[in-house]
Image (cartoon, rainbow, N blue to C red):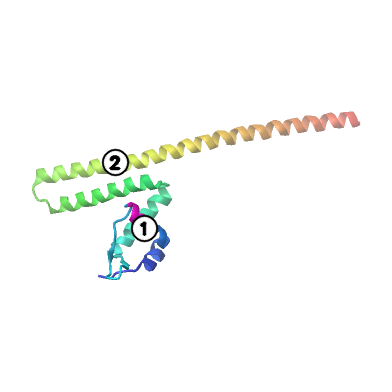
Amino acid sequence: MTLYKIDDVAKESGLTKRTIRYYEEIGVMPSPQRTDGGTRLYTWEDITYLKKVVRAKEVLGFSLQELHAYVATSDALNEQRFDYQQTIEVQERIEKLSKMETTLNEQLELIEQKLHSIHAVQSELEELRERVQTGIQRLQEQKQEQDSSDRVQDG
C-alpha cells in the first residue's frame, strides 16, 4: 500500500496543508497514521475522502458544521454498506437496506436544506434585479421626457 505525505495530499486534493490539519483537528477527517517521528502518512482512500469533502464544500456550499454532518452521514453509509455486504440472511439484509435508506434520506435532507437556502437567496437577487430594471426604465423615461421638453423650449 502506497502512503503519501501531507504535501502530496495537498497537491492531489487542492487543499492547503494547514486546511488538511485543521480538518483533522475538528474531526472532518480521521487522523492518519504517523511515522515514529510524527509525520502524517495518508492512504489513497484518505485522498479520495478529502476530495469528497472538497466537493461537498465547494459544490454544495456547506459550512464546516454542515460538512461535518455530511461526512458523518457518509461514514455511516459506508459502514452500513459494508455490513450489508457481510449479511446473507434475507430479513437481516432488508433491515440493513432500511438503515441505509434512512441514512440516505438524512444526506438528501442536508442537501435539500442547502438548496432551499440557495433558492431563497436567488429569489432575493431576482427581486432586486427587477427593482433595478424598473428603476432604470423609469429614469430612462424621465430622461426622454426631459430631453423632449428641453427641445420644445429651445425650439
Q: Name the one closer to the observer, 7 or 70.
A: 7
Q: Amino acid at mark 1?
A: Lys
119 vs 139, left or right, is left
- Numbered mark located on residue 3 in the image: none
Under tag 1, what secondary structure?
A: helix
SS assignment for the magenta stretch, majority: helix
153 vs 99, left or right, is right
Q: How many marks?
A: 2
Quadrant of the snapshot with the C terminus: top right
Q: Is residue 136 above or below residue 47?
A: above
Q: Name the one closer to the observer, 63 or 31.
A: 31
Q: Which residues are magenta?
A: 21-26
Quadrant of the snapshot with the N terminus: bottom left
The picture places residue 23, in percent across and down from the top left corner, at: 36, 55
Dots 2 and 1: beta carbons under 8 Å?
A: no
- Numbered mark located on residue 51 in the image: 1
Q: Is residue 54 above or below residue 110?
A: below
Residue at which label 2 appears: 106
Residue at the spot 33% in from the left edge and 48% down from the top edge: 68
The picture places residue 111, in percent across and down from the top left corner, at: 36, 42
Residue 145: quarter of image: top right
The picture places residue 88, in percent across and down from the top left corner, at: 9, 51
Q: Name the one closer to the observer, 120 or 42.
A: 42
Residue at the spot 18% in from the left edge and 53% down from the top edge: 82
Report if residue 28 lies within the magenta region. no
Give the mark nearest the N terminus, 2 or 1.
Answer: 1
132 vs 117, left or right, is right
Q: Name the one closer to the observer, 116 or 18.
A: 18
Graded by Cα atoms within 10 Å as few (under 14), some (14 to 19) or many (20 or more), the crowding at tag 2 reads: some
Under tag 2, what secondary structure?
A: helix
